[in-house]
Image (cartoon, grey):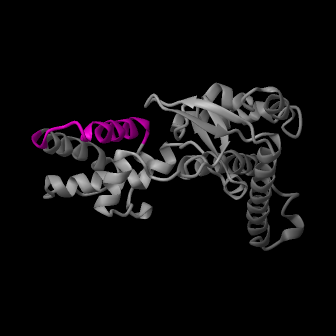
């Protein structure tokens, strides 16, 4: 598996390094995912077949519309699986999770819904002529190991990084507050996109330069923009509680939006 290192200049003007996932790791993840998709397709077909009273004439009496529906279902399973997993699980399918890789954007953050859609629609080209031959050639030859879908969507596939020791002022502040992340199941995190992350990160970057009155005003403003989007009720909460909630939100989403050096 490839362990090549690539430098990324983040929107926060910090240079970090990521390990690019090469052909071997991406192929291993794809094999796992395709095996799972095949099992789902076989299971669906088995349910359809074994619920028929007369299986002997099941296939001979089907119309063209029936077979067209089966093809559409197979298409939705094959392409929908990759899109939904990468959209809902921060760039990870089951195969990617098991191999330890994920999809990120070219700045090292979580990919947008549009970029995930583009990279997966273009699988139709990367799969040509058979067995992902176009994709294999692209990943093998591209300096960032990108297939066509990655190039058009502005994404990379990288190995998961690990947090280094907490040394920043922000990390020390969170340690002093002894906060815990939100339960991801309690929030609608798929609605938290790059613009929300940029707003949260800007707030936290500026937090230590603000006067107490400025902190209170900006905290109210940011909290009432971000929390309704993810289904979290902030009505009746004071500035101190909202500050803690914003720090907790950062703890909850930072691994999905921030790649740290290793």
Residue furthest left as drawn: 213
Q: Which residues are magenta?
A: 193-213
Image quarter (top left, top right, bottom left or bottom right) of the C terminus = top right
Give the vertical position of 183 relative to 157 (above or below).
below
Q: Nearer the viewer, residue 27 or 206?
A: 206
Expressed as whole percent of the image width and height from the top left, the position of residue 222 reads 24, 42
Which of the 4 image quarters holds residue 118? Answer: top right
Image position of 212 (left or right of 16): left
What is the tally of numbered marks visible in this picture?
Answer: 0
Q: Is residue 223 visible?
A: yes
Expressed as whole percent of the image width and height from the top left, the position of residue 9 reads 53, 28
Expressed as whole percent of the image width and height from the top left, the position of residue 91 reads 59, 46
- In the image, what residue occupies the spot 45% across and 48% down? 254
- In the image, what residue occupies the spot 25% across and 41% down? 207
- In the image, what residue occupies the spot 55% across and 46% down? 87
Asked if the magenta segment contains residue 251, the reply would be no
- In the image, what residue occupies the spot 87% across and 64% down? 57
Q: Nearer the viewer, residue 103 or 119?
A: 103
Q: Is residue 64 visible?
A: no
Expressed as whole percent of the image width and height from the top left, the position of residue 248 reads 34, 56
Asked if the magenta segment contains residue 212, the reply would be yes
Q: Nearer the viewer, residue 30 or 139?
A: 139
Dominant secondary structure, magenta: helix
Give the vertical position of 53 relative to 190 (above or below).
below
Image position of 69 (left or right of 251): right
């Amino acid at each position: 598996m490839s362990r090549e290192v690539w430098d990324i200049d983040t929107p926060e003007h910090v240079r970090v390094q990521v390990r690019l996932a090469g052909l071997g790791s991406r192929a291993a993840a794809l094999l796992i995912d395709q095996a799972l998709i095949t099992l789902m397709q076989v299971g669906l077909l088995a349910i359809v077949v074994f619920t028929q009273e007369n299986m002997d004439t099941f296939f001979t009496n089907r119309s063209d519309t029936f077979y067209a529906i089966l093809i559409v279902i197979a298409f939705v399973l094959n392409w929908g699986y990759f899109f939904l997993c990468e959209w809902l699980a921060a760039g990870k399918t089951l195969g990617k999770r098991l191999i330890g890789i994920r999809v990120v954007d070219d700045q090292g953050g979580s990919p947008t819904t549009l970029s995930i859609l583009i990279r997966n629609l273009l699988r139709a080209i990367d799969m040509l002529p058979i067995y992902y031959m176009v994709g294999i050639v692209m990943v093998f030859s591209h300096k960032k190991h990108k297939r066509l879908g990655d190039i058009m969507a502005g994404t990379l596939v990288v190995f998961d990084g690990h947090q280094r020791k907490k040394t920043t002022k922000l990390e020390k502040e969170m340690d002093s507050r002894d906060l815990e992340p939100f339960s991801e199941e309690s929030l609608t995190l798929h609605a938290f996109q790059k613009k929300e992350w940029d707003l949260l990160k800007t707030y936290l970057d500026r937090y230590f330069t603000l006067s107490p009155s400025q902190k209170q005003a900006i905290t109210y403003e940011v909290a009432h923009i971000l929390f309704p989007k993810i289904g979290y009720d902030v009505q009746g909460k004071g500035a101190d509680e909202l500050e803690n909630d914003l720090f907790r939100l950062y703890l909850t989403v930072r691994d999905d939006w921030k790649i740290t050096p290793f």
